[in-house]
Amino acid sequence: QVQPVQSGAEVKKPGASVKVSCKASGRTFANYYMHWVRQAPGQGLEWMGIINPSGDGTSYAQKFQDRVTITRDTSTSTVYMEMSSLRSEDTAVYYCARMQSGAFDIWGQGTKVTVSS
Amino acid sequence: EIVLTQSPGTLSLSPGEGATLSCRASQSVSSNYLAWYQQKPGQAPRLLIYGASRRATGIPDRFSGSGSGTDFTLTISRLEPEDFAVYYCQQYVGSPSWTFGQGTKVEIK
C-alpha cells in the first residue's frame, strides 16, 4: 500500500491561509473517501473533514465548518485542505487519510503547519 | 455528542507482558465503525483494528480487539519492543463525523 505524499512544511502568520496537498498514486485512492485529521503538538488526533471520491461532496467537523475547505482534483489524484484565518492554535501536523471499511487505513506522512507572528 | 474515553492514560509494562487498553463511549455505538490505531513519535498513525475486532492487513495476531455497545478493548498479548507507542480508538459518530479517544500511552517499565 503506497502512502500518499503530502506537501511540505508551512510557516504562516496569524490571519493568513494555508493549503495542504495530498497526492495519491493513481487508482489506489480514486474510489475512496478521503479525510483530514490534525494533531497539535503533544496532543491527540482531531478529525477535520471528509470528501467523497468524485469530489462533489464534503462534510466538516463543526469547529472547522467556517474556516476549512477540502477539495479534490480527480485528474491528478490530489486532495487539498485549505484553512483560512489561521491562529496560533492551528499549529499542528495535518494528515490526509484514506477510508476503507469505515476506518482510516492509509495515511499521508503529515504536513507541519506553524502559525507564528 | 459522543465522547470516547480511553483508560488508562499511561500503561507502564515490560516486554513480554500483556496489555489491556479500554475505550468507553458516552453512548452506545456501532461496533462496525470502532477502530484502533498505533502511533509512534514522529510517525503517522497506523490502523491496527477495524470493525472492533478485525485486524488490518499485516497486523500481528498478538493484537486483538473486542467489545460492543459502549465498551471496547484492545489487547496486546505479549508486548514486543516495537509495541511501545500511543494507541487511539476512533468511532464514526454520524452526520457524518468521526471522533478519537484521547489516547493511551504504553511505555516501558
Image (cartoon, coloured by chain):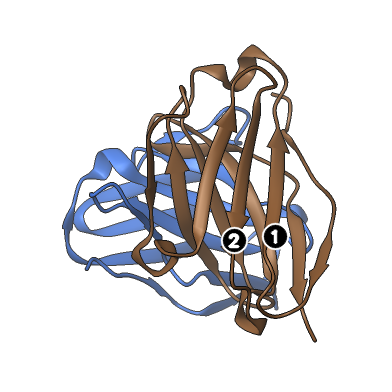
Chain colours: A brown, B blue
Residue A62 placement (x, y as % from top left)? 34, 64
Which amino acid is tagged 1? Val
Residue shown at the point (42%, 30%) measured from the top left = A52
Image location (x, y in percent) of residue A83: 59, 61
Query: Which residue carries the number 2 mark?
Result: A83
Answer with mark 1 or mark 2, whichever residue precedes in sequence. Answer: 1
| Residue A85 percent across, percent down from the top left | 59, 72
Label 2 element class? strand
x then y, percent, for residue A69: 51, 51
In percent of the image, x 70 and y 60: which residue is there? A18
Q: Secondary structure at mark 1?
A: strand
Dot 2: chain letter: A
Residue visible at 47% across and 29% down? A55
C-alpha span from label 1 to label 2: 5 Å
Which residue lies most toward the top here?
A27
Identified by mark 2, the residue type is Met
Judged left or right of residue B102, residue B82 is right
Q: Is residue B54 left or right of residue A4?
A: left
Q: Residues within 10 Å of mark 1 (few under 14, many from 20)?
A: some
Q: Return the mark for residue A18.
A: 1
Dot 1 and dot 2 residues touching (CB under 8 Å): yes
